[in-house]
Image: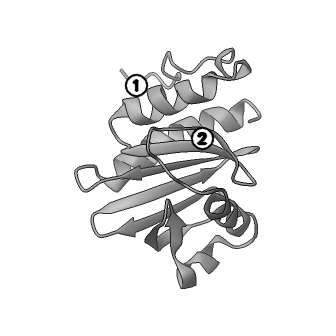
Amino acid sequence: KGDSSPPLAFTREVHQHKMSWQAYVDTNLLGSGACTQAGIYDLAGNPWAYSAGFAAQVAEVAAISAHMASDATALAGTGLIIAGEKYMFVRGDADCVVGKKGASGVIIYRCNTCCLVATHDDKIQSGACNNAVGKLADFLKENGI
């Protein structure tokens, strides 16, 4: 319908409760059908919420977050490692990094106080995953998170 308002799952009140971060992962990322696994982490890589079985490590998220804060393109030389899987750097800047491994991939968005990390398998287009994660990132940034 062309309405740019956020989906109903986006509410200002939700992030005030501990379980709310899990709701963002379950509803806005996994529920979109565009992400296979996902998590929300602080900028130091500590997990706030993540999907069952998603094993992104603190050091992995912290390293990517730090590169995004300084020079995301430096990841081109090393690639990205998330949950022990190495992804080839496709593109990146201070806001978003995209990696791929065959037909699967990883999308990381850096917000004001957190990082959104999502993977997609070969049945999901990278652009669809990027769009789903980007919408939540935009909402969180607009709300100072």
Exactly how many numbered labels are in the figure? 2
**Where residue 66 sits: x, y (%)?**
73, 65
**Where residue 20 sits: x, y (%)?**
62, 22
**Where residue 124 sits: x, y (%)?**
28, 49
**Where residue 42 sits: x, y (%)?**
72, 46
**Pointer 2 local density, CA inside 10 Å: few below 14, some 14–19, many at least 20:** many
Q: Quadrant of the C terminus?
A: top right
Q: Which residue is mark 2?
A: 137
Tag 1 secondary structure:
loop
Query: Which label lies toward us, 2 or 1?
Result: 2
Q: CA distance from mark 2 to mark 1?
A: 20 Å
Name which residue lies at 66% across and 56% down. Answer: 58
The image quarter containing residue 16 is: top right
The relative height of residue 31 versus residue 97 in the rendered view (above or below) is above
Name which residue lies at 75% across and 70% down. Answer: 70
Of callouts 2 and 1, which one flags the residue occurring earlier in the amino acid sequence? 1
User: Horizontal placement of 52 versus 124: left or right?
Assistant: right
User: Horizontal placement of 88 versus 67: left or right?
Assistant: left
The relative height of residue 122 versus residue 92 in the rendered view (above or below) is above
The image quarter containing residue 106 is: bottom left
User: Horizontal placement of 54 versus 109: left or right?
Assistant: left
Looking at the rendered structure, the kind of residue marked 2 is Ala
The relative height of residue 112 versus residue 76 in the rendered view (above or below) is above
> Which of the pair 142/60 is nearer the observer?
60
Q: Which residue is mark 1?
A: 2
> Which of the pair 51/138 is nearer the observer?
51
